[in-house]
Amino acid sequence: MWSELLSLLRQYEGTGLIFLLYLLALAYLLITEKEKEKRILLVYLPLAVLILFLNPLTGKLLSRFGETEIAYRMLWILPVTPSLCYAIIRITSPLKGLKQAATLAGFGLLFVLSGSLIYRSPYFHRAQNLYHVPPAVVEIQKMVYYPGREVMVAFPMELVPFVRQYTSTIWMPYGREVMMADFAGEAEVFSQIMNAETVDTELLARYADRFGCHYVVLPETKPMTEKLTDYDYEFFGRVPGYVLYRSLTADFFDPYNLP
């Protein structure tokens, strides 16, 4: 249990530099802050949260309800940004002129070095339209939209986070939950089939039928063991980077009674 909590803490830390700076800020405020209210809010309560989070009894209690993986949400309570900003203000306020500017620039550089460019992740894209989602998502959803009906569409994982930002009429057999630790089930298997380096076409068709997919979207360069059109799917269209296939057998469904 202790190892699981430490693993969650390491995931929360990211590179670890910001969290280290936060711990240093806590120590600094513990020593220098004299106002009772600020000490309670910025020092005592965060320390209590950390102690509670790292207590193995907390993990055991959550595990009894099958919720250990959500313990990381306790870390969201930590006032990391306010504490860091307040500590930096206290440190730099007595300084003047060039010394103050250089100190602030130094902290800014540490913040930059603490992370990585967000657009390196396939799940984040620079805004290219008013919807702030990849253009392919908008084009695909306009193609598959059916007035008055919900449509089930299997997307590659890099598009999944953006789909329902555009419209709620598109349903998906799997979502961001398959990226969470300890998630299991057919949806996870389906996502692995869809996002494998080489798609097993027979398995893909089987799971797409199992989840009642009306459409399947695949990267146009994705290798496949066979043609999807050999398994009751027809070529439906193409957008830059992706190919759409439409099921010849799927019926419209009740989205609140999914398999």
Image (cartoon, rainbow, N blue to C red):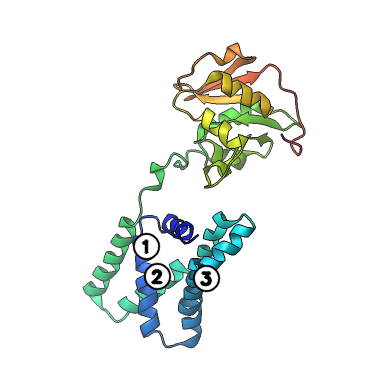
Of the residues shown, which amino acid type is indicated by label 2? Answer: Leu
Residue 90 image-quadrant placement: bottom left
Q: In the structure shown, which secondary structural element does the residue marked by tag 2 occupy?
A: helix
Answer few, some or many: residues within 10 Å of disc 2's Cα (few below 14, many 20 plus, some between 14 and 19): many
Are circles 3 and 2 on residues that touch, CB within 8 Å? no
- The mark that comes first in sequence, 2 or 1, is 1
Q: Which mark is residue 18?
A: 1
Of the residues shown, which amino acid type is indicated by label 1? Answer: Ile
Residue at 55% in and 60% down: 71
Look at the image and tell me in which quarter the C terminus lies. top right
Residue 150 screen position, x and y as percent:
72, 33
Of the residues shown, which amino acid type is indicated by label 3? Answer: Leu
Residue 20 screen position, x and y as percent:
35, 66
Residue 96 screen position, x and y as percent:
25, 78
Are circles 2 and 1 on residues that touch, CB within 8 Å? yes
- In this rendering, the answer to whether 76 lies above or below 49 is above
Q: Which mark is residue 84?
A: 2
Q: Nearer the viewer, mark 1 or mark 3?
A: 3
Q: Seen in the image, is 97 located left or right of residue 39?
A: left
How far apart marks 2 and 1 lie (CA) works out to 9 Å
Q: Nearer the viewer, mark 2 or mark 1?
A: 1
Residue at 59% in and 11% down: 230
Residue at 31% in and 76% down: 92
Q: In the structure shown, which secondary structural element does the residue marked by tag 1 occupy?
A: helix
Residue 215 visible? The answer is no
Q: Which residue is mark 3?
A: 52
Q: In the structure shown, which secondary structural element does the residue marked by tag 3 occupy?
A: helix
